[in-house]
Image: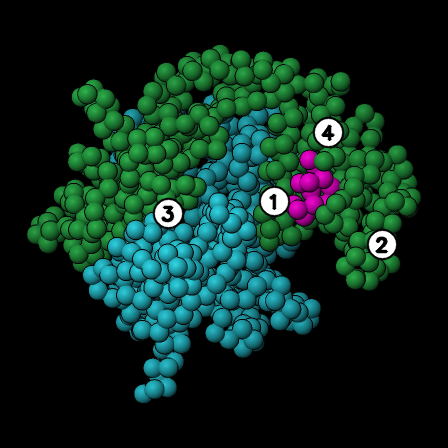
Chain colours: A cyan, B green
Amino acid sequence: MGNKNVTAEIIAVGTEILLGNIVNTNAAYLAEKLSELGISCFYQSVVGDNAERLEDTIRLALQRSDVILLSGGLGPTEDDLTKETACKVAGAKMYCHEESKARLIAYFEKRGLTLTENNYKQAMIPEGGIVLTNNNGTAPGVIIPFENKHIILMPGPPGELKPMFEESVAPYLRKLTPDVILSQTVKVCSVGESMAETMIADLIDTQDNPSIATYAKTGEVHIRVTAKAENEAQAEKLIKPVVRELKNRFGNNVYTTREDVSLEAAVVELLKSCDMKIMTVESCTGGMVASKIVNVPGASEVFKCGLVTYSNKAKRKLAGVKKSTLEKYTAVSKETAYEMVKSPEVWQKADVIVGVTGYASAPEEDPSKAGLVYVSCNACGKITVKEFKFSGNRAKVRESAAVQALVLARQCLLEALSEKTFGE
Amino acid sequence: MGNKNVTAEIIAVGTEILLGNIVNTNAAYLAEKLSELGISCFYQSVVGDNAERLEDTIRLALQRSDVILLSGGLGPTEDDLTKETACKVAGAKMYCHEESKARLIAYFEKRGLTLTENNYKQAMIPEGGIVLTNNNGTAPGVIIPFENKHIILMPGPPGELKPMFEESVAPYLRKLTPDVILSQTVKVCSVGESMAETMIADLIDTQDNPSIATYAKTGEVHIRVTAKAENEAQAEKLIKPVVRELKNRFGNNVYTTREDVSLEAAVVELLKSCDMKIMTVESCTGGMVASKIVNVPGASEVFKCGLVTYSNKAKRKLAGVKKSTLEKYTAVSKETAYEMVKSPEVWQKADVIVGVTGYASAPEEDPSKAGLVYVSCNACGKITVKEFKFSGNRAKVRESAAVQALVLARQCLLEALSEKTFGE
């Protein structure tokens, strides 16, 4: 039970952010999470690996906010000063935390790496601090309670910061605010952000609690419904009718209302539910669709195999695309996309075969074709091909194409299932 | 010609950044540009559309920096307060800038849109301010000189901010500083960050200009050498011997000294240089290695095909792993990894075949095996298998495995090439 209006600020520490070498995605992640927790964040800042300026920044933050979230600067090198500086501000001494030291030694032993003296620095913890276990790296995080405020130190790499926030920091912050903030996300595919906003403009305008916010993701829109209430049951009661209304409006384009379910996980679940298997035949995405599917735990039950047929020869030899088709229509055509999923000449067919071919960057012969992508799907024998024109750089086009391949696989599978049901 | 050590800071204005709805990419862009101009940027911050907090933030920035770059909050709505607040701080009155007003009217007419009264707000300019024409939107930018400092206001959309910076702000800033800052990055694989730091501790300790900083990436370490000089040639002269020394110390583990070359791009370049082709056979990475290679422009010249053999059946049918091997040693074993790259039963062999098999998350039969990965490479007939034990969640283990597959491919290829050279 704590302060009614908890305020927070986010400080990213790192010269590489100040130099523009990396984009500060941690701040966006933390900001979104704070908002979900009902904690107001009025400032974000970035400061380099400089003790004096970092100290000033922390002191200023303590004057104006209750919770200070720092990321970065917990590494083993001399440049890493966050813990030392936070301790100085809070007047806390450090001691060697034996459990963290043991974890550190085990981490290095497991990898057959040599632990150098400077690594032990990472096991030093401020007295009175709460250690946050790092299951994805060497630097533990720390919460330093200080004069009714909370200084929270987390490692900089997003792969370490995000799980640590979810596992340890979010539960800690939840206790600071008496209101229960609950949110549910309605994840929508096949609809753009501005279209989605228009479709629910009336809801956004009239709602206050729960509030409704849209977040544009690659190929998806996430609509978050957030309610503030005295207890969880009341918050749920506020959220439920709004989620129901959103499901009504977006119909089949809602692929999940669960926070932890990605588009690929929804596809895997759908395949499992009807005991079907999928395979992929990829050109410009080069294995990205397969990789997304394999990232879902338990994907082995539904994933048959994947082919990366980037060259024309591979398209012919592995996917069974006819030479005449490639010559007449080229590798990036709806005809090639169609044949890629028609009957891959390898092994045996899956129930759902999804294919992608396109120009991830501008082809020499016609630069205007950059971003032109064909996505195809063979669901129980029925083939659908869709054309897209994506913008952005090579990586962005490939990511968009991979997402749309999953969207198409889901759509075709749903259609195949509904036809099957009606046919029976 | 101006001040020797010009300092700047970047303030992004916008509640949507504070809520995490959008990532602050403008800051990364401006930071990189400032660094190129030799202007030291010690702070970045983000503040919402709130007059009081914005005023405090600008006042603080003026205390510690020479140049304040603000982005966002120049729109026509009541929420857009940046210009008004900056004027308040600088004690400047606003007047209607006729040229900007005329541009505004023309902009709306051209698009057949109706100009509303609040739009004229965008043509109001502080007295003494320098107007920065916006060729990509409605809001002009402004530079407000104030007590030897420079408050620079730019619109928030990156498509407007970037061209305005290039066309008007950069030339203005260039006059403020005589120095040039140049940096070069030495990218190292097969060596951990703390090991790398230990290996160059003497250089880091003694160097001031150029400065040396290390950055840990998944499976890699980047060492950045940054010099400040009167001109580009002198900066290059300072950097060169340090980069040479780093190359000496890390030898073959340096895969590039070019900013824009990734590990996968280095592998593609190496393959191109010796006219060899690569193929991938992936289990737990599920196409991620292939996808990384395909993300390199021109990969088609060296990438033969990729197989995603996630199930045992696919390992047998596509990769030609013997049933007895899978039964005796299991799918995650050095024997299976070996056979995956020995002679994939598909189509024809590549010069380099790289394979990955492992547990991305904890297997039911023995959870302690989570993160156990075998990476194999067949380079011109010689097969090498390496065992790793990665930690982290499913995505992290897979990313680490994919990077180590590329590292091994590079090592084996270099070995094969050196043997070939010595053999001749």
Disc 4 and disc 3 in contact, CB within 8 angstroms = no
Of mark 1 and mark 4, the one earlier in the sequence is: 1
- Residue B291 is marked as 3
Mark 2 vs mark 4: which is more N-terminal? 2
Residue B313: give x, y in percent of width and height: 18, 58
Q: Quadrant of the C terminus of chain B?
A: top left
Q: Name the residue carrying label 4.
A: B171
| Range of magenta residues | B154-166
Subunit of mark 2?
A: B
Dot 4 amino acid type? Pro
- Binning the other alpha carbons within 10 Å of mark 3 as few (below 14), some (14 to 19) or many (20 upward) gives many
Q: Same chain for the residues at labels 3 and 2, yes or no? A: yes
Mark number for residue B24? 1
Label at residue B105 = 2
Point out the tag, 3 or 1, that comes first from the N-terminus.
1
Same chain for marks 2 and 4? yes
Q: CA distance from mark 4 to mark 3?
A: 40 Å
Place residue B62 in its image quadrant: top right
Kindly indicate whether the residue at mark 1 contacts the one at mark 2 (C-beta within 8 angstroms): no
* Relative image position of residue B328 (x, y in whole percent): 8, 50
CB-based contact (under 8 Å), mark 3 and mark 1: no
- Secondary structure of the residue carrying numbered label 3: helix
Name the element at disc 1: loop
Q: Chain of mark 4?
A: B
- Nearer the camera: disc 2 or disc 1: 2
Residue B312 vs A70, above or below: the answer is: below
